Amino acid sequence: HLLASARALLDAAGVAYETDIGVGDVAHTLVDMAEQNGADMVVIGAKGHGALSSALLGSVSQEVARASAVPVTIVKHAQAVESLDTDD
């Protein structure tokens, strides 16, 4: 299952969570789900494709941040952070 590793981390940390499945445009579906569930905030990952790729392909995390009525925290993928550290 795609969420197994995330569930294991949350369970180990004792963090309460709910899972849900949505269908449709990813960014707007996430925003709708956050609103329907009364979320206080959204935490979403970013793959770190860079400005050009984001402009051409769009960015789900950026659209969620733009469209959300609650605060959004965008977390970079570990590989993106590691590649930034090794570019020196």
Image (cartoon, helix red, strand yellow):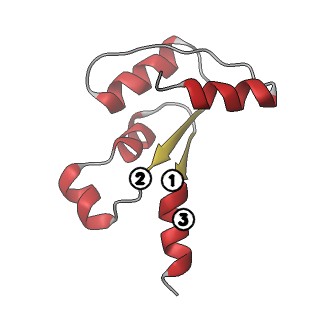
Q: Is residue 22 left or right of residue 20?
A: left
Residue at the image position 26 percent from the left and 26 percent from the top: 25
Q: Amino acid at mark 2?
A: Lys
Which secondary structure lies at badge 3?
A: helix
Residue 61 figure quarter: top left
Which secondary structure lies at badge 1?
A: loop
Q: CB of mark 2 within 8 Å of CB of mark 3?
A: no
Q: What's the mark number on residue 81? A: 3
Q: Where does the image place residue 67, in percent across and percent down from the top left?
A: 39, 35
> How would you rate the neighbour count of disc 2 (Cα within 10 Å): few for under 14, some for 14-19, many for 20 or more?
some
Residue at the image position 81 percent from the left and 24 percent from the top: 14
Q: Nearer the viewer, residue 22 or 41?
A: 22
Q: Earlier in the sequence, mark 2 or mark 3?
A: 2
Q: Amino acid at mark 3?
A: Val
Q: Amino acid at mark 1?
A: His
Q: CB of mark 2 within 8 Å of CB of mark 1?
A: yes
> How would you rate the neighbour count of disc 3 (Cα within 10 Å): few for under 14, some for 14-19, many for 20 or more?
few
Would you name the residue on which mark 2 appears? 47
Would you name the residue on which mark 1 appears? 77
Q: Is residue 37 left or right of residue 2?
A: right
Q: CB of mark 1 within 8 Å of CB of mark 3?
A: yes
